């Protein structure tokens, strides 16, 4: 059996799809059934730790596996699909190794630049890959519906714990989700509430303080040119208590009754934890360094009476300049 790259696929918005053929180069036919097992590697030979799922998505069929007979000289097919990464990344898949169901060993293939399979760590919308079953034709690997064929990589988007109140989860099952589900888990059981929120798929940050849960977005502006949003969710009722809009990604921190946030436009702000009104603001990165150099600010951290944040270019590299200022 030999692995080769299939033709480029016409992708839906924000999707990165790759098709592969399994060529039977033996002199007799064989049968395959199930899902391939993948490992993807970057240019340095390091494994890209994607999550994998088999439930279908916007591009991939949700059909169950069937037995596929592959004649001598014939081919079977599978496809993979992932969401575009929100975070900037330099880690791109350059090699794939495929293990077939019931078979020992693996098939390897060097990958070109396109189709793009970019890697971002857990928590980014692009952190998971949906796989099709092995199919007799390329068409059979694809979602043929105008709607998504499945939820993609179902994941807990955000999770946080308040020592006195237990665990809180904010989940959404698919890219097209227009709602979020907030769950509170403690020894007495689970409470949950579904909340309408059109930007559900862009939620990237959750923090918890005495006065609420705070969920912030990181909108991909080239796809959805709308302001980022911060929600304050009541930990008792699980209802939205307040919301505020910001020009770029927002990540928050609470310490006792005080609250701060880093904004993707290069500012750190102090917020009222109940109303989310901005109390004070300080710019740490110039607008040009954000726009031209791709710099951003990490989630704030607090220690020894100081609030600190770090200038970053992406999720894996740190800019050597660290900006720290007093929280008082």
Image (tube, rainbow, N blue to C red):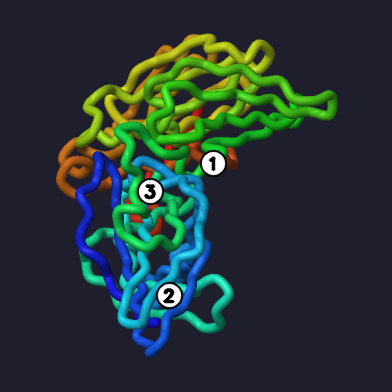
Task: For the residues labelled 3 and 1, say whether their Cβ atoms are less than 8 Å apart.
Answer: no
Residue 177 place in picture, x, y as percent: 43, 27
Residue at 56% x, 38% y is: 156
Task: For the residues labelled 2 and 3, say whether their Cβ atoms are less than 8 Å apart.
Answer: no
The span from disc 1 to disc 2 (Cα, nearest Å) is: 25 Å
Q: Secondary structure at mark 2?
A: strand
Sequence-earlier tag: 2 or 3: 3
* Vertical position of residue 164 compared to residue 284: above or below: above
How many other residues sit within 10 Å of disc 3, few (<14), some (14-19) or many (≥20)?
A: many
**Residue under circle 1?**
155
Residue 158 lies in quadrant: top right
Residue 203 lies in quadrant: top left
Q: Is 184 positioned to the left or the right of 39 in the image?
A: right
**Residue under circle 3?**
60
Residue at 40% x, 61% y is: 135
Residue 250 lies in quadrant: top left
Labels 1, 2: front one: 2
């Amino acid at each position: 059996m030999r692995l080769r790259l299939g033709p480029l696929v016409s992708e839906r918005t924000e999707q990165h799809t790759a098709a592969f053929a399994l060529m039977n180069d033996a002199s007799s036919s064989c049968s395959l059934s199930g899902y391939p097992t993948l490992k993807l590697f970057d240019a340095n030979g390091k494994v890209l730790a994607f999550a994998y799922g088999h439930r279908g998505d916007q591009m991939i069929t949700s059909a169950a596996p069937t037995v596929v007979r592959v004649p001598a000289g014939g081919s079977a097919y599978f496809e993979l699909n992932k969401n575009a990464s929100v975070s900037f990344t330099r880690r791109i898949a350059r090699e794939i190794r495929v293990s077939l169901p019931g078979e020992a060993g693996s098939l390897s293939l060097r990958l070109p630049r396109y189709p793009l399979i970019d890697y971002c760590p857990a928590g980014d919308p692009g952190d998971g890959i949906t796989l099709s079953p092995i199919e007799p034709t390329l068409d059979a690997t694809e979602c043929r519906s105008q709607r998504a064929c499945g939820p993609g990589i179902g994941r807990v988007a955000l999770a946080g714990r308040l020592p006195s109140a237990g665990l809180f989860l904010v989940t959404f099952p698919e890219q097209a989700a227009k709602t979020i589900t907030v769950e509170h888990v403690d020894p007495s059981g689970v409470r949950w509430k579904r909340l309408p929120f059109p930007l559900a798929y862009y939620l990237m940050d959750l923090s918890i303080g005495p006065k609420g849960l705070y969920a912030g977005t990181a909108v991909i502006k080239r796809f959805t040119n709308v302001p980022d949003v911060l929600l304050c969710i009541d930990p008792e009722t699980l209802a939205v208590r307040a919301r505020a809009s910001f020009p770029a990604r927002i990540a928050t921190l609470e310490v006792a009754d005080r609250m701060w946030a880093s904004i993707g436009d290069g500012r750190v702000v102090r917020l009222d934890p109940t109303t989310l009104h901005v109390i004070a603001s300080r710019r740490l990165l110039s607008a040009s360094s954000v726009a031209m150099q791709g710099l951003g600010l990490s989630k704030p951290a607090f220690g020894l009476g100081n609030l600190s944040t770090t200038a970053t270019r992406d999720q894996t590299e740190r800019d050597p300049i660290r900006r720290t200022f007093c929280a008082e």
